[in-house]
Image (tube, rainbow, N blue to C red):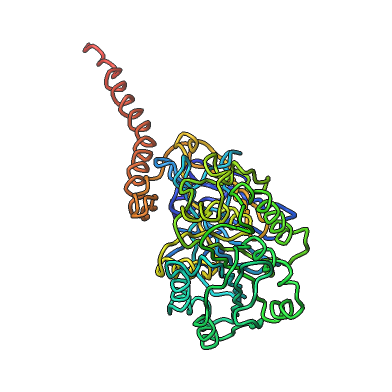
Amino acid sequence: MNLAWVWALIWGCGGELTPISNTTTRVGRPEVMEGTELELRIFTDERECRAKVQPDELHLCMPYVDRANGEVRLGFQLRLDGDTFPLPLSSEHIKVGHLGRELQGAGLKNPVKVVPHDPIRAPQLFILLIDGSSSMAQKRRMDKVRSALLTPEVVEAFFPDDVKTGVVVFQFTNGTPVPLGGRLQVFENRREYKQRIRSLQPLNGYTHLYDAITYATGEFLEQQAIQDLLTQFEMTPTIVALTDGFNNMGRNDTCGTNAKRLDTLLEHLQIVRSPEAGQDPRRRPSVYTVGLGRPLRPRFALPRDATQGVTARELCGKRFVNRRIDGDLENLGIDNASLDWIAKVGGGASYVRQDRKGLGTAFQAAAAARYHWFEVRYRVDPFYLRRNFRTTLRLVSFATGEASIELFPSAWLDAPPGKRGLDGWSEQRPFRSILIVLIPMLGLLLTLSTAGAAVYHAKRAMFMRVRQPKKPPES
């Protein structure tokens, strides 16, 4: 008999609450939000976990509440039409609500961490957008990009052995991006890809970054040949855009000039990735951005709702709004604010790197494996875990999905607090550690259950001794 059932017998476990093995926690039935594209399934059934996860990760699949350290852990999975829908999720893709209040991200007051499990490689069409502007000839920048794209780890990421993928490479300067080599080609093997990447050279002109991303996520994907390719091999389009500077369409452009242009691009991304567009979630593009250089605004933070319009002040900060890009800001750093914004609304991630190795890591991350299931961990003040509470998980990228669950920590006794792991989060102690607390508690209950009878019989014996009848007088 595990610990949860012992507590259920001692304290009662009515309704549809499920006891969690080796803990003092019970959970209600998960509630899945209706009308979403994906089913976000929070695990509460140990049998389901055993069928979905590796045996050594079973304890990570089930809910866990550490009241002493103020931490909560939940395992979840995304499904489409009853089948697992693997995704490359990280913390920025999941919003966590605790008692109706949305928590903040990692490193802030209420850290949230998403840990992926059970990686697989999914069929993907990678669309590389490489900045071909004249500045890419400076400081051997294009050489770094070419070298990074040819590293064995990046080539392996784009062309894994166990799944069908394709790569299309564009360069952009002015107007519509041009295919590498002048002819549109989908590279389906490593040899063709490496041969063409070796020919990558800087072009001339400005940096029409926003137009390139608009084309790659819109007009290009609408071509019948590309639609047939995506459908035939069930590929998901993944766009990776690299630049060494700013979106720059003319000599007199300032940072503030880009605010309206960026806003237009973000509106486009919302449309092509929205459920209303009728796009199958499996065909929905994701946009990753890579910046080659130093960030102009290293402390930049996106507004709470990145889809509610872009102002020049938000994009550039007070200092750079009216500064010219050409010959000025481009020498100070890259527009990391735009790259963050595009990746956020585009359902991807943004990376800023300065060398070949860093670029290679960024390309590998953009081509990352997808995962069968995830655990979300978050931390709050332990005060908010003293009674039952509801946690909500909401997917904010790739597609829509939401679910919530109510958790009931024991009102009488905490399980032993978890020990701190190497990553700073609590690790659940093994069952034998919990027995150290449970056995003395059960011993105390047993003692108390027999103490009353013992005291009663002791008092009765004393009373009988005192009230013994006196001997009758001798006659």
Give whichever of 435, 127 is nearer the camera.
127
Relative to 468, does residue 197 appear above or below in the rendering? below
Where residue 378 appears, as percent x and y from the top left, is: 48, 47
Q: Residue furthest bottom?
A: 191
For the question of whether residue 1 can be seen, the reply is: no
Give whichever of 402, 128 is nearer the camera.
128
Compared across the picture, whether 373 is left or right of 210 comes to left
Compared across the picture, whether 31 is left or right of 432 comes to right
Relative to 472, does residue 6 appear above or below in the rendering? below
Q: Residue furthest left?
A: 474
Give whichever of 30, 20 is nearer the camera.
30
Where residue 294 appears, as percent x and y from the top left, is: 44, 56
Q: Residue at x 56, y 50 (%)?
A: 324
Relative to 252, does residue 132 appear above or below in the rendering? below
Compared across the picture, whether 396 is left or right of 350 comes to right
Q: Residue at x 21, y 13 (%)?
A: 474
How many numbered markers are drawn?
A: 0
For the question of whether residue 67 can be seen, the reply is: yes
Where residue 115 appears, as percent x and y from the top left, is: 48, 59
Where residue 280 appears, as percent x and y from the top left, is: 73, 67
Q: Residue at x 75, y 55 (%)?
A: 35
Quadrant (top left, top right, bottom left, bottom right) of the C terminus:
top left
Quadrant (top left, top right, bottom left, bottom right) of the N terminus:
bottom left
